[in-house]
Image (cartoon, rainbow, N blue to C red):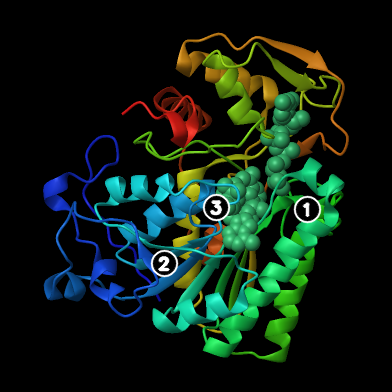
Amino acid sequence: MPVPRPIARDARGVIPRGRCIGPLAESRVGRNPSLEHIAGGAGRHRTEADRANTETFDMILLTGGAGYIGSHVCVALLDAGLDVIAVDNLSNSNKQSLERVQSICGRSPIFRQADIRNEEAIYEILRAWDVTAVIHLAGLKAVGDSNLRPLTYYENNVLGTMRLVSAMNRAKVKTLVFSSSATVYGMPAYLPLDEKHPLGPTNPYGRTKLFIEEMLKDLYRSDDDWRIGILRYFNPVGAHESGLIGEDPLGVPNNLLPLVAQVAVGKRERLLIWGNDYGTPDGTGIRDFIHVVDLASGHLSVLRYLKEPGVLTVNLGTGNGSSVLEVVRTFQAVSGRPVPYEIGERRAGDVAICYAAPMLASKALGWKSARSLEQMCEDHWRWQLKNPDGYRGARF
Ligand code: NAD
Ligand code: UFG
């Protein structure tokens, strides 16, 4: 299984040009010309010496690779010396994110615009590129939207995963990392939330995650060759320290950090805080915010862990809760900009407090988040400043 390979970077996390590892993907393009490769050029091709320095040489299929978390996972994988084929239907993302990944890493993933519901397309990719493991992030993720369009969510997330896994089965690729969510826990019965906490998601989106988890466990029960990692993410925020990749929500953001950042940059007048009458020290909701770069590194740790067949279900969180008001204050401090807010009603379905027990990740994977709330806000702010209109209006 993959072993991370540290690569020198400058102070902003970008690999200096002279030190780029060439786009290996190009050397394989001839095998299937229908696969689109993000144009390379910055680096040289990987040499035999590079190969010898890499302890393993895996090709990872990354679904949802152009998305917010996907682009950061892509950086982590490429930095570790792995090869990546990113598959995305671009329903909620922009291919530019992967071009930026190339600037950061000095080599590019292969990109194929495809839908995970297209089993034949996925099967062909798995076979054509000798894929050894799949990291599956593709999915729809907006809680409110899932209440309005539940069938769309079941079709995209549950059926999509069924088709993906079915293609993997046929291609005999039986290592899978799946992005689940802390939302599967529902209303906390106790805190912090450990992996044994009862499950009871309160919306269709969360139920798609729960059903997929159960489906994957059934798959392993039926065929114990499978190696499956189920990652329950808490609240991913922040951006790569280069400011080149980050979260680029289409339309009105659903989550706190992008909204705070848009207020700070002047795109919105004020933040509406949904309730300050919770049983928390300042009355606002508390969440376990985790830096997206830390979250991405967790995927490498779990790939390394999956040497033996089995199913590992694990939280990826920091173990610390921060309130909405703490986030607002921290963001104001790091950006030097005011974040005006007003207090509104509670949002239906919100829990007061949600944070992880991160011990299993630390024990089983040797993984821990490292970055502080200040760093999350700083990196998010840098991304926002450099890309006020996301990938469409970059200032580079
Ligand atoms: P995102 O929307 O930025 O990325 C998801 C990507 O999947 C997008 O690029 C989208 O175009 C792609 N996609 C969607 N349906 C597809 C399909 N049928 N075929 C191919 N590609 C498809 O979201 P993200 O925040 O990067 O989330 C990634 C994963 O992590 C999702 O599965 C999400 O449910 C999960 N997750 C996210 C959060 C969060 O707060 N961001 C929290 C917990 C779990
Ligand atoms: N909040 C506001 N105002 C806003 C937006 C959010 O006050 O405009 C508050 C919420 O009430 C909550 C906190 O900020 O207390 C965080 O809200 P988010 O919407 O950013 O995040 P959630 O914890 O509600 O949900 C997120 C993802 C889910 C995922 C879950 C995992 O949206 O998909 O984290 O814990 F499942």
Q: Is residue 387 above or below residue 303?
A: above
Q: Quadrant of the N terminus?
A: bottom left
Q: Residues within 10 Å of mark 2 (few under 14, many from 20)?
A: many
Q: Are marks 2 and 3 in contact (CB under 8 Å)?
A: no
Q: How many marks?
A: 3
Q: Is residue 151 visible?
A: yes
Q: Amino acid at mark 3?
A: Leu
Mark 2 lies on residue: 85
Q: Nearer the viewer, mark 2 or mark 1?
A: 2
Q: Quadrant of the C terminus?
A: top left
Would you say the beta carbon of the disc 2 residue lies within 8 angstroms of ligand 1?
A: no
Whichever of callouts 2 and 3 sits on the residue coming sooner in the sequence is: 2
Would you say the beta carbon of the disc 3 residue lies within 8 angstroms of ligand 1?
A: yes
Expressed as whole percent of the image width and height from the top left, the position of residue 143 reads: 77, 44
Where, by quadrant of the figure, is residue 36 drawn?
bottom left
Q: Is residue 107 above or below residue 14?
A: below
Would you say the beta carbon of the disc 1 residue lies within 8 angstroms of ligand 2?
A: yes
Q: Residues within 10 Å of mark 3 (few under 14, many from 20)?
A: some
Mark 1 lies on residue: 205
Mark 3 lies on residue: 90
Q: Is residue 138 visible?
A: no
Who is closer to the viewer here, 290 or 381?
A: 381
How many angstroms separate mark 1 from mark 3 (CA)?
19 Å
Expressed as whole percent of the image width and height from the top left, the position of residue 166 reads: 64, 82
Q: Nearer the viewer, mark 1 or mark 3?
A: 3
How many angstroms separate mark 2 from mark 1 (CA)?
26 Å
Whichever of callouts 2 and 1 sits on the residue coming sooner in the sequence is: 2
Whichever of callouts 1 and 3 sits on the residue coming sooner in the sequence is: 3
Residue at 65% from the left image edge and 39% from the top image edge = 288
Q: Quadrant of ligand 2?
A: top right
Q: Amino acid at mark 1?
A: Tyr
